[in-house]
Image (spheres, grey):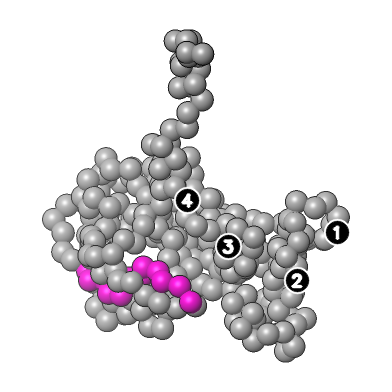
Amino acid sequence: MAMTRRDREKSEARKTNAADWAKRQERSTGSSAVKLPNGVESYKLDLGKHQIDILLYRVGKGNPEADEGFQHFERTYEAHGINTPDGFRSYCCAWKCFKKKCAVCDFLQRNGSSADPQLIRSLRAKVRHLWVVNDKPGDAKTPLKILDTTHYNKGIGFGELLVDGVSSVPKYARFADLDRGLPLQITVKEQKGGGFKYNAATRIDFLPRDYEYPKGIVDKAPCLDDCLVETPYKVMKRLLNQEDPEDEDDDEDETPRKGKSPK
């Protein structure tokens, strides 16, 4: 039987939109530790050389490097990597990021000397950074993006490279200034590690510039401190045990810890 016009219109209305799907993929950070604000995309480290400006933002709560309300250029956080049914995912360390009990840290304390060494290494918290990025340097109207990077990677982690540059040339410390900042030229190459391939910055060069950003751009930038995702203790514990994280048994106390940080 031939399809009527109304039937065709209903069928068209039920189709998914590839453009919407592509936008969702662009917004995905591949991490369960970070959630992007509405309308903000992640910046991807694609192969090749790229120039970006890292910009200041207004600090929120919990930043370990700057008080709330200050202007700052990054958000340091620590994350645990866990093999889940959806693949290898990163989760914020509850202790380091939110000063609460962390199921992974507790597991490492209890089993650090008896569990598989490779598992222990993979679960240890890794230092990471979030940055506010303009991928069209000098254009203040370009939508700002968020870059999520490692700190350590055998001497060529993004954080390591940036620290090396800033430490070697004093004026490079102004790279995020609105008026005297310096664009970063990032060289990205394919790397191998942990049985898979990934793109990583292998070199960062600081370039001169002849433009300034308006002061108001700081308050328009996304607050990086609000991007970190707090995963409940019981959910993390179930993920560690390869259980369904949606189960409702085993309600753990998630009150803030006292004393020293877990190892």
Neighbor class of circle 3 (other Cα within 10 Å; few <14, some 14-19, many 20+) is few
- Circle 4 residue: 28
- Amino acid residing under circle 3: Gly
Q: Position of residue 60 (x, y in %)?
A: 52, 52
> In the image, what residue occupies the spot 13% across and 56% down?
210
- Circle 3 residue: 87
> In the image, what residue occupies the spot 37% across and 50% down?
145
Question: If you read the primary sequence from the N terminus, does the residue marked by circle 3 or circle 1 appear first?
Answer: 3
133 relative to 256, above or below: above
Element type at marker 3? Answer: strand
Is residue 248 shown to the viewer in this render?
yes
- Amino acid residing under circle 2: Lys
Question: If you read the primary sequence from the N terminus, does the residue marked by circle 2 or circle 3 appear first?
Answer: 3
**Labels 3 and 1 touching (C-beta < 8 A):** no
Q: Position of residue 190 (x, y in %)?
A: 33, 72
The reply to whether the magenta stretch includes residue 202 is: yes
State the image quarter where residue 244 is shown: bottom right
- Circle 2 residue: 258
Neighbor class of circle 1 (other Cα within 10 Å; few <14, some 14-19, many 20+) is few
- Amino acid residing under circle 1: Asp
Q: How far apart are marks 1 and 2 (CA)?
A: 22 Å
38 relative to 177, above or below: above
> In the image, what residue occupies the spot 47% across and 10% down?
4
Element type at marker 1? Answer: loop
Give the residue at the far left of this rendering: 210
